[in-house]
Image: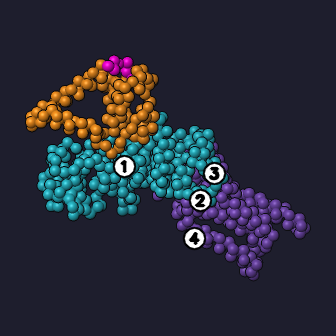
Chain colours: A orange, B cyan, C purple
Amino acid sequence: MDIIIMSDSSMPLYEQITNQIKKLILSGELKQGELLPSIRMMAKELKVSIITVKRAYEELEIEGFVATALGKGTYVSMVNTERLRESQISQIEDQLEGIVLAAKGIGMNLEDLQERLKIIFEEA
Amino acid sequence: MYAVTFNNVRKRLGDFELNIPKLAIRQGYMTGFIGENGAGKTTTIKLILDMLQLDEGSIEVLGKNIKGGSVSIHQEIGYVGEPTGYPEETPLEAIKDMLALFYKNWDEVLYKSYMQFFNLNSKQKYKDLSTGQKKQFAMIMALSHHPKLILLDEPTSGLDPVVRNEILDILMDHMQNEEVTIFYSTHITSDLEKAGDYIVYINDGQIKLNSEKDTLLNEYSLVKGPKALFKGDICKEFLGLRENSFGSEALLKNKKVAYELFGEEVKYSKPTIEEIMIFLSHNNSKVVTEKALRGGNKQC
Amino acid sequence: MLESVIKLLKKDWIFIKSSLKNLIFVALIFSLVMPWGNGGMLLVVPILVGYLFNYGLLAYEEKYKMDVLLCSLPVGRKEMCLAKYIGPLLYTLISTLVMMVSLTVRMVVQSSWNGEVLVNLLLTVIAIALIYNAVILPIILYFGAIKSRWVMMGGYVLAFILMGMSSSEYSQQLQAIIRQGFHTKIMSSLVLIGVVLYGISYGMSRGIYNRKEFK
């Protein structure tokens, strides 16, 4: 399982971990029902604080990606990943709508917007 | 819940006074203990170990009062001091034999595996080890009896980053057990940046900060910009302010508040633990602290 | 509690055996050789051995801050104090035994065998050991071995002076008086006094050690 975190990024560490695990789940690398490493094991492997990993796991649980069974650990939720992906897509679409409205508001046209989108996509 | 609690603790040593009305160290986590030299870190740790007598107050460790309970408490404590206190002319094996006698949970297998891991020869005399190896051995002695509370006073000073990483690894191994607590006093804050769960900052004998490390690093904000922007009423929000010939920097408790006050004309960054410590300290003459600011210091 | 004291004594032995072999060597030499000197010499041995195993051991511990480390061990101050009282006494008694053996050999070789003298000397030596340690230990525990070295030096020097004096005229008179009193009964009571002093000293030291700070 590859999780790479950057300590100097402006995104909080727990968010980075959450995002990376989400990606692994959505891409299928982490299968449904599969057990995640224990919080403390993950903290040791990544050399981050236990509280950070705890928070990441809690976020994932709130968003429905994982579930915790007492005594067994945290495992990938038997959740319809398709549905999750769709909800993520609709979130992105909402944000795009906001951006498009803002761009239109200052008179930007589609090509201009697309070009900037391309640059940002390549840089991020 | 808490591995160590301090209640109304006072201790005077010559001119210095340690005054800790309340301190609670959570069980199962790594708490970093930072502060300048002479701030009281070693005194605090020695009080927990009953090496110094309290003038006032009480300390509880793992649920027991240290007054009267320290013998059984010490079974569960692993300690690395500064200086380590190991006799120079004695071979490592003899030192181990001397100490292992006293611990019910001494794990000879674990000890041997640690010795192998760090490549230490038990027939060597302690004085023949390098500085790094001496600290490694002290750490091995502290950990080989499966302690529940690990007290470390500058355990990695003088060690290279590779060795420090190995030691952090071993410590986090011990933390796989949810009952193990680490209280880690150090100047080398990089290890705490990574794996510390809580940070306690002591200055002039008093605890000035006790918070989750993530909160400190994610919510505190270091603001840099032209001097003019750092004057006026907004000074009250600063935890500390530094000026040099090229501009000013301030530390604020809350990123959002910082943005509201300064807007786009400044640079924001995540402070390191070291920077937080520098801004909070009293002693740097170019640093103006919160106390001074609230007192209407004209420099602001 | 006894178990902890035994562990402490074991620990001290491991320490001496592995790092302070010269102490053992010197103590042995003194114990074997002194009985062959003039009268007063062997009375000095308990003081010398006491010096070695008190100052030698404790000063070494203090120098490397090992006493601080030992304070983090799961052992109570009471037991640590008791071990400091029993340990040196044990070593002194052993060296006394070695001394007596050596003295017996001398007596046999020089055909001057005298059982009563042997017993009286034994008792005197034990009494001196008890009294010397009883006086010196609270001082060491209160001030620390390194600061107390001047006091110990004083005792050491005094011992040698006494040794030297045993051949002078003045001391011949003193020795005559001593020989008169050199009865088993008197020596036994001296030992008893020594034991009592030792007990009192221990009581004092326990109080001192309980409140001791390891900075």
In-image side of B172 versus C48 (left or right):
left
Magenta residues span A73-82
2 or 3: mark nearer the eye? 3
Label 4 element class? helix
Nearer to me, C134 or C22: C22
What residue does disc 4 label? C150
Is residue C105 on the magenta stretch? no
Badge 3 or badge 1: first in the primary sequence: 1
Label 2 element class? helix
Badge 2 or badge 3: first in the primary sequence: 3
Callout 1, which amino acid? Answer: Val
In-image side of C163 versus B92 (left or right):
right
- Residue A73 horizontal/vertical position (percent): 43, 25
In-image side of C1 versus B291 (left or right):
right
What residue does disc 1 label? B9
The chain under label 4 reads: C
Q: Is residue A39 above or below residue B166?
A: above
Q: Is residue B211 above or below residue A90?
A: below
What residue does disc 3 label? B121
Label 4 Cα neighbours within 10 Å, binned few <14 / some 14-19 / many ≥20? few
What residue does disc 2 label? B127
The chain under label 3 reads: B
- Both marks 3 and 1 on one chain: yes
Mark 2 → mark 4, Cα distance in angstroms: 28 Å
1 or 2: mark nearer the eye? 2
Q: Is residue B184 above or below residue C161?
A: above
Mark 4 → mark 3, Cα distance in angstroms: 39 Å
